Amino acid sequence: MFKKILLAATPQIGIGTAPRAAFDLARRHGSDLVLYHALPICCDPWSSFEEVIPTEQLVESARRKIAELYADDLKDIPNHTIRVVTGAAQEHLLKIIHTEGVDLVVMGHHRSGMVRPDRMWGVVDTTIRKVCANVFCPVMVVTDEDPKVSDVKRIVMATDFSTPSDSALCYAIQVARTYDAHLDIFHVIDIGQNCPNPEYYMQDMNVFIDRIKDRMERRYSKALTGISHSFECWEGVPYAEIIKHARWNRADLVIMAQYSSSEELTKSFIGSTVIQVALSPGCPSLIVNYRARVCM
């Protein structure tokens, strides 16, 4: 399913999270693997690191350390390369993704409290956010130690019935077929965290839940032919309920659409449902950007 995987490798993410997921996927699918790291070399009008040590030497040193750190894991992945660049991480990363036909990007969250000049209050993870917003291939965000991405048995697909969400569902169906996994189609009735919708308090919530389940049945059943699946819906704050649903059902993977609704366009920071789910402790999240797909 994945011919070329890119791992954003950095010492600030745990070896058992994103790296392990990328290695396991590369082995299962026989994929080419690119290990990518950007050195945050900065300079100002008065000084530069180049005055102390040549950039080429820094790059080669980082490449050697990456090869040594992952030596045991890379032994059985013959088609791998290590790319080390200097400068803004996402700019070079996006160039590689778009020009080299990368099928999947695997990223992890930073585990240290390191001070970063590109981070401000309210911003969750700038690089992950920018990459997710600018690539067509899916981005897998891994926060869990020992992710079971090579043996996925249960997938949660969060939908809001938007066009990007339908596209992500088509991709989720493809993943479910590949792994012969059960697919949970899940919708959260957003009751409003700050501005509750009075409509939901004027009659039994089960009326709205049954209506949503009927809608999912009519909209998705034909595309799900031959796939083990279920439809579920309840009310709450979307990101929290998606996390709980995945945990309660012991899901191996959560699939979501990037910018699944027009409101998401203005929520690239901590308000984004997708980013909050992806960076919360739990199973890996697969973020799918919109691409026209026909499956229903």
Image (cartoon, grey):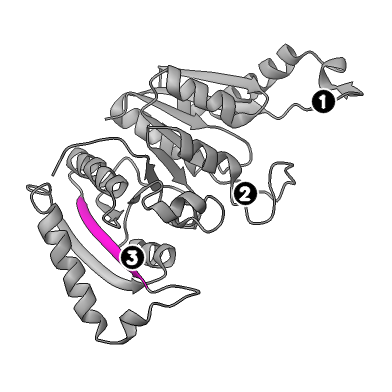
| Mark 3: few/some/many CA within 10 Å (<14, 14-19, 20+) | some
Answer yes or no: is residue 71 visible.
no
Which amino acid, mark 1? Cys
Marks 2, 1: nearer the viewer: 1
Residue 66 quadrant: top right
- Label 3: which secondary element: helix
Q: Is tag 3's residue or tag 2's residue first in the polypeptide sequence?
A: 2
Give the crowd class for mark 2: few <14, some 14-19, many >=20 residues within 10 Å. Answer: few
**Residue positioned 85% across, 21% down in the render:** 48
Q: Residues within 10 Å of mark 1 (few under 14, many from 20)?
A: few
Up-down: is 245 above or below 22? Answer: below
Under tag 1, what secondary structure? strand
Percent x, y for residue 168? 29, 44
Residue under pointer 1: 43
Q: Which residue is mark 3?
A: 245
- Label 3 vs label 2, nearer the camera: 3
Could you tell me which residue is drawn at 12 percent across and 46 percent down? 223
Residue 236 position, x and y percent, is 38, 73
Residue 67 vs residue 144, the one in the foreground: 144
Q: Is label 2 in a helix, a strand or a loop?
A: loop
Instruction: Point out the tag, 3 or 1, that comes first from the N-terminus.
Output: 1
Q: Residue at x 29, y 87 (%)?
A: 202
**Residue 34 highlighted magenta (yes or no):** no
**What residue is pinned by disc 2?**
111
Q: Residue at x 22, y 42 (%)?
A: 170
Q: Who comes first in sequence, dot 2 or dot 1?
A: 1
Segment tinted magenta in the rendering = 182-190
Magenta segment's dominant SS is: strand
> The N terminus is located in which quarter?
top left
Tell me residue 172's x, y (percent).
25, 45
